Amino acid sequence: MQTVSVSLCRLPGSDDLPLPAYETLQAAGMDLRAAVTEPVVLVPGARHAVPTGIAIALPDGYEAQVRPRSGLARKAGISMVNSPGTIDADYRGEIMVLLINLGQEAFTVNRGDRIAQLVVAPVVQAQWQVVESLDETERGAGGFGHTGVK
């Protein structure tokens, strides 16, 4: 398992919240917690940018992905509008989680709730090579379920 050093700043008013942490030794994602000052109620279909109370400085060549928590999705239909959310190495603002309630009942986000996962990953940037045509493959241009249709 590789590690990378990431600078983290607690924002004012978030000293009482645990830092993002891996829940198991082989976990890929760290849990992010809600830094709301009062409970936020998400009615079905509603979305809200939930603060986490932290900002980070990733090293060059890395990104952080904010992903939904599978337990919240399964139990309550809570997901993220932009999943995964990408945090670039040059972003220094507060990490926000864009939650959406896809469930059937209202869901309350309380201070300190684990609301998302943060995965730090290396970045590869593409360099375009403009060509006249692409090589042929068995699949070709078939998409959107093409391989599952007989």
Image: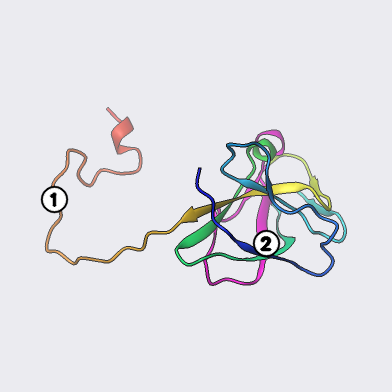
Residue 102 vs residue 117, the one in the foreground: 117
Residue at image x 77%, y 68%?
Answer: 11
Corner quadrant of residue 16: bottom right
The image position of residue 147, as x and y in percent, is: 29, 34
Numbered label attached to residue 5: none
Whether residue 64 is situated above or below residue 68 in the rendered picture: below
Whether residue 148 is situated above or below residue 27 in the rendered picture: above
Residue at mark 1 to residue at mark 2: CA–CA distance: 41 Å
Numbered range of the magenta stretch: 74-102
Residue at image x 63%, y 38%?
Answer: 70
Q: As shown in the figure, which amino acid type bears the numbered disc 1?
A: Asp
As for residue 65 lying within the magenta part, the answer is: no
Callout 2: 10 Å neighbours few (<14), some, many (20+)? many
Residue position for label 2:
96
The image position of residue 3, as x and y in percent, is: 54, 51
The image position of residue 129, as x and y in percent, is: 20, 65
Q: As shown in the figure, which amino acid type bears the numbered disc 2?
A: Met
Residue at image x 36%, y 63%?
Answer: 125
Residue at image x 19%, y 44%?
Answer: 140
In terms of sequence position, does the residue under pointer 1 or pointer 2 come before the other?
Answer: 2
Does residue 33 appear in this view? yes
Does residue 44 appear in this view? no
Left or right of 55: which side holds 67? left
Residue position for label 1:
135
The quadrant of the image that shows the C terminus is top left
